[in-house]
Amino acid sequence: MNLDRTICALATAPGEGGIAVVRVSGAEAYPIVEKVFRPIHRSRSLAQAKGYTAMLGHYLLDGREMDETIALCFRAPHSYTGEDVIELSVHGGSAMADGLLQALYLAGAAPASAGEFTRRAVENGRMSLTQAEAVMEIISASGRQGAALAKAALDGALARRIGTIRAELQSVAAHLVAWVDYPEEDVPDLSVGALTARLGEQKAALEELIAGYGAGAVLRHGVDCVLLGRPNVGKSTLLNLLAGFDRAIVTPVAGTTRDVVEQAVMLGEIRLNLFDTAGVRDVGADGDAIEAEGIRRSWNKLEEAGLVLAVFDAGAPLTEDDLEIAARCKGRPALAIFNKQDLVAEDAALQAEMDKVRDCFKQVLPLCARERESLKPLTQAVAELLGTAHLDPGAACLCSARQLAAAKAARDALAEAIESQEQGFGLDAAGVCIDDALRALAELTGEDPTEATLDEVFSKFCVGK
Ligand code: GDP
C-alpha cells in the first residue's frame, strides 16, 4: 500500500441528499486542497488553518467558481487516518461532488481504493484491525442493537476481552516454561488438574464468544426468512402484519400467492429478508406448473433460511401437508405459528394439535395474524429463537468471519492442550498448543497483520471509508 499518495473519495452515500462530503487525506492534503478551494474571506488561507476548524469558501474547477464548500480541517495525527485530513462538504447529489473530485484529481490527489482511509488509520496506529472491522459493521448494521454491538467492538470491547484471555494464557505458558526449563528453581508445582482447569476456563471464554457470533451477525445483517404453509393458512396476512401494510394480496381463494416475494422488514431489532412463498401443497401431474415451481423454490429456500416461519391453521386439524412441512422443519431454526387463534373453540384441542409438531420446531406460537398486537409475542419468540433476546449490546462480540475463524483455531488449540494432558503427554505438549492458541488470538486482534489479511479485510469496505 502506497501511503505517500494523498487520496480523496466521496465519503457520503452516492445519490441525492442534503450534502455530500469528499474526504482528502495525506501529506499533501492542504497544498492540494488549496489549489481548488477559495475561502470567502480572502485574507484567510487553508495552509494556516488549525485542526478542528472549519472554513467557508467555494471550490474551483478549471478556474470556475463552483459550489459553496465548507472545509473541515484536521491536522495529523489528530484525524481519522492519523494524517492531514480535510473534509469538504458541498451540496448533495452527485454533480457537485463529482466536480469536486475532478478538481482534486487535477490538483494531484489520487482516488482512494476501497477502505483505504480506514486502512491508513490502522497502518498509522489510530485503530486496531478489529476496530476497523467494527467500523464496517457499524456502516452496514440494519438495526440499533446491531449498531450498538459494532460500536462496542469499535470501543475496544472485543480487544479487551481477547486481551484478558491472552494474558491468562501467557501466564500459564510462562509457568510451563519455568517448570520445564528450570526444574532446579523453586517453581510452584503445576498439577495436571490445575493446568487443565485454567485452560478450560479460557476455552470456555472463547466458546462463549463463538456462540454469540451467530446472534450478533443476525443483529447486524438480518436473517433470510422463509414463510411456509399450505394455501389459506394466512401467510400473506402474516406478511402484511410484518410489513405493516398490504404488501401481498390477501384473498380467501387458495393458491393465489404464487411467487417468492422478497421484502425486508424489521421485526424488533432484527431485519427479516422475507420470502413469501406459494402455498405448499401436493401438486399432482396435472397440477399448476407455476405453482409447482413456487413450491419447489420454497423448499430450496427452506434449506438456506436463517429463520423459518411455518404457518398452520389453528382453526382446523393438521393435514398431511402440514405434517410434511413440520417434518421438513425439524432441526432448522424454525418457528411454528398456529394462526387464526381467534377461530379456536377449544383450547385443549389446539394444544393437542400443537403437541403433534412440537418436536419439529424450536418454538410453537399460537397467534392471530390479523391483529397488530400479535407482533409483540412474535418479535419475542423470534428473538429467543435466534438468540438475540439476551445478547448484551455492550458485550464483546466477534464481528467478522475472519475473527470467528481465528477464535475457533484458538479454541481448538486449547482443546488439544487439555486433551494432551488428559492423555498423559508431557507439559511441553501443552506448551506447544498454548503457543498455537496465542498465535491465533494475535491474528484475531490483528497484531502484525499480514498484507494478505489487510487486503482481505479492506476489500470488503466501501470506497470513502
Ligand atoms: P395464504 O394463502 O396462506 O397467504 O393465506 P391468506 O393470508 O391469504 O389468508 C387466507 C384467509 O385467512 C384470508 O381470508 C384471511 O383474511 C384469513 N385469515 C388470515 N389470518 C387470519 C386470522 O388470524 N384469523 C382469521 N379468522 N382469519 C385469518
Image: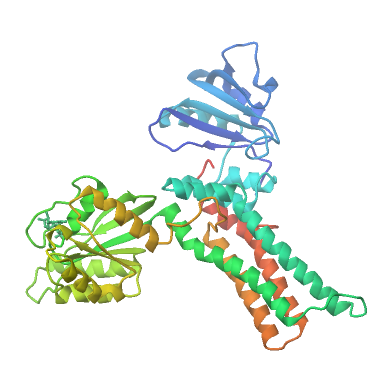
- Measured from the top left, where is residue 122 in percent x and y? 65, 48
- Quadrant hosting ligand 1: bottom left
The reply, left or right, for residue 275 in relation to residue 389 is left
The image quadrant that residue 168 belongs to is bottom right
**Residue positioned 54% across, 28% down in the render:** 88
The reply, left or right, for residue 367 in relation to residue 70 is left
- Measured from the top left, where is residue 42 in percent x and y? 61, 11
Q: Residue furthest right?
A: 184
Residue 60 appears in the picture as rendered: no
Q: Residue furthest bottom?
A: 424
The reply, left or right, for residue 463 in relation to residue 451 is left
Q: How many marks?
A: 0
The image quadrant that residue 117 belongs to is top right
**Residue positioned 68% across, 31% down in the render:** 75
Up/down of 421 relative to 381, above or below: below
- Measured from the top left, where is residue 299 in percent x and y? 25, 70
The reply, left or right, for residue 178 in relation to residue 105 is right
**Residue positioned 85% across, 74% down in the render:** 178
